[in-house]
Amino acid sequence: MVEGNGVGKLRVGMSVKAAKTSMPLVSDRTIADDEGGSMRSMHLRIGVATAEAEVVDGKVFRVSVRNPTLRTARGFGVGTKLNELLREPGWEGGFAEGYLFVWNTKYCGLSFELNFDPHNDPASNPEWNQDGLASLPPGTRVQSILVRGCGQ
């Protein structure tokens, strides 16, 4: 299950050693980040899926989920339609590293990356509140979940 502090046994803030001890390690490597630098990235098996843990100073900094089998307690996950999220009030959106993310304070520590590219849609709405998000194309879906941890 994905929650605001982690995915399954994988928790934001846990040490690399604890992560490797509590679940199978698929890969551990240094990769290029979105800003031209590098970062440590571990892929860990959680059930039948994997999640990516970004590591800073020997601890899990954030977790990315791109597998549709890992879901939140409410059933949100990769593939969830935006209009399903918007059935609840309180959603906001914004851009980070070139991608549109949505979040709701009701789900502390979680944000959902959408498959919407505003560069390809000149009619995109600059107000990323509940109404602005509702104006996005009907096929807009979650393409990843980012777990930052509550309070971060």
Image: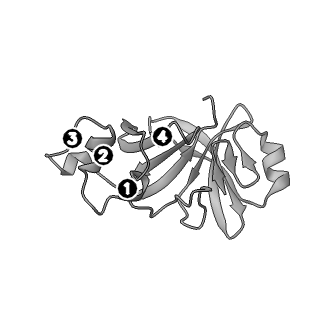
Disc 1 crowd rating (10 Å Cα; few below 14, some 14-19, many 20+) is: many
Q: How far apart are marks 1 and 2 (CA)?
A: 8 Å
Of all residues, the one furthest to the bottom in this rendering is: 48
The mark found on residue 82 in the picture is 1
Q: In this view, does 138 lie above or below 40?
A: below
The numbered mark, 4 or 1, whose residue comes first in the sequence reads 1
Using the image, tell me which numbered label, if any, was put on residue 125.
Answer: 3
Identify the residue position indicated by label 2 in the image.
133
CA gap, disc 3 and disc 2: 8 Å
Residue type at the position of mark 2: Leu
In depth, the one of 112 and 21 nearer the eye is 112
* Amino acid type at mark 4: Asn
**In this rendering, position of residue 96 left or right of residue 9:** left
* Nearer the observer, 6 or 44: 6
Dot placed on the residue nearer the N-terminal end, 4 or 3: 4
Left/right placement of residue 65 relative to residue 144 reads: right
Q: Distance between the residues labelled 3 and 1?
A: 15 Å
Question: Of marks 1 and 2, which one's residue comes earlier in the chain?
Answer: 1
Residue type marked 3: Asn
The tag earlier along the polypeptide, 2 or 4, is: 4
Tag 4–tag 1 contact (CB < 8 Å): no
Q: Position of residue 130 (x, y in %)?
A: 33, 41
Q: Position of residue 83 (x, y in %)?
A: 36, 57
The reply to whether callout 1 and callout 2 are in contact (CB within 8 Å) is: yes
**Label 2 Cα neighbours within 10 Å, binned few <14 / some 14-19 / many ≥20:** many
| Crowd around label 3: few <14 · some 14–19 · many ≥20 (10 Å) | some
| Front position in the image: 22 or 80 | 80
Alpha carbon distance from label 4 to label 3: 19 Å
